[in-house]
Amino acid sequence: MEFAERLTALAAKVRQQKGQIETEEATKNAFIMPFISTILGYDVFNPLEVIPEFTADVGVKKGEKIDYAIMHGGTVQILIECKKSKEPLKIEHASQLYRYFAVTNARIAILTNGEVYQFFTDLDAPNRMDAKPFLVLDLGDIDETLLPELLKLTKDIFDLDSIISAAGELKYIGAIKRAIAAEFKEPEDDWVKFLTSKVYEGAYTQKVREQFTGLVTKATKQFLNDQVNDRLKAALGTPDFPMATDAELAASVTSEKPVEDDLNDNGIVTTPEELEGYNIVRAIVCGDVKPARVAQRDAKSYFAILLDDNNRKPIARLHFNREQKYLGLFDANKAETRFPISSLEEIYEHADALRTSVKAYLVEAS
């Protein structure tokens, strides 16, 4: 099994089991030890490779233990501090990592709850662990661009010099990406003001701020939709979706509402994952109907995919606002059946049912 496949398999296991994991020890056994063995490639039962409950006296503190120390070349190279899976990671959890980092040869420290792995080194000051990670691996949302760097930490390839040399760039690129993601989800005033200044020449008043906050949010969602669509087309190996007429395009675009409606979104947040699922469904049915006729409407409890933006012509519903995701499909009587899915790729397994629904609506209209 390839490296990326092993990581995907572990991520699926974490999604399925994390609701039942209550303690730190259970987190170690279920998630972290498999990560050390199947992803990093170290034998967790060989004390020459992995030392559990590693002890190193630190100043006046005697007998303190860190969860795991990974050995490579006969010396400690990686320290790992673990927290239970249901506990969000905080920098306060890394206090022991800070202390141990200064008294061992380790240049890499990992803070993890089994789902999120934060990797630290000593970029800011020699032999002193940085306050911010240079790499963050989230098994709930794997960033594939990080895999080559993660591979450098594995037993067979371990390349500390390459890791450290790339850490500075990774640290800031990762931080910038997370900052952009936060602005996309809920834009701050400075971000709104900056983008407004690019397109609006008038004074930036309170009324203008309120108006453009809604517009920036809407433009962001549409931009993400376009990016996902481009990636999907590339993955499908097709140069473009079939072209729609101007009239069809106009019919598929929701008219702009007053600013008050833009601001009053009732707490509905359309996620990139929902948009990617929408584009997968649209790609599946584009052989039967032009993509411009496949519309989407988000709601608090589900994301609806409709033909001709008509609630009486549901193609599918994405129930992604929970730990277990479901794809909702409709029969001839428009009764919905929910199918559990663990990844967006599983939508393709229901391609025939999706096409059948669209064809039924086309027959009704003829």
Image: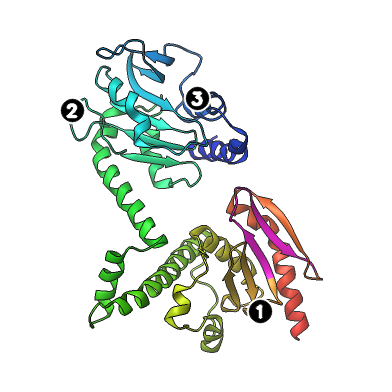
- For residue 308, which quarter of the picture? bottom right
Q: Is residue 85 magenta?
A: no
Q: Please report whichever mark, 3 or 1, sits nearer to the chain's N-terminal start.
A: 3
Rendered view: 170 above or below 298:
above
**So how many labels did they put on this image?**
3
> What quarter of the picture does the N terminus occupy?
top right
Q: Where in the figure is residue 342, as x and y percent of width and height?
A: 62, 48
Q: Kindly identify the amino acid type of the residue bearing the numbered disc 1.
A: Asn
Q: Magenta span covers which residues?
A: 315-331
Residue corresponding to mark 3: 37
Rendered view: 334 above or below 253:
above
* Dot 2: element: loop
The residue located at (68%, 55%) in the rendering is 349
Identify which residue, 134 or 267, lies in the foreground: 267
Residue corresponding to mark 2: 126
Q: Kindly identify the amino acid type of the residue bearing the numbered disc 3.
A: Ser
* Dot 1: element: loop
Q: Where in the figure is residue 77, as x and y percent of width and height?
A: 33, 21
Q: Main secondary structure of the magenta part?
A: strand
Residue corresponding to mark 1: 310
Q: Kindly identify the amino acid type of the residue bearing the numbered disc 2.
A: Pro
Q: CA distance from mark 2 to mark 1?
A: 62 Å
Query: Is residue 37 left or right of 101 when viewed as pictured?
Result: right
The residue located at (29%, 43%) in the rendering is 170
Residue found farthest to the right:
333
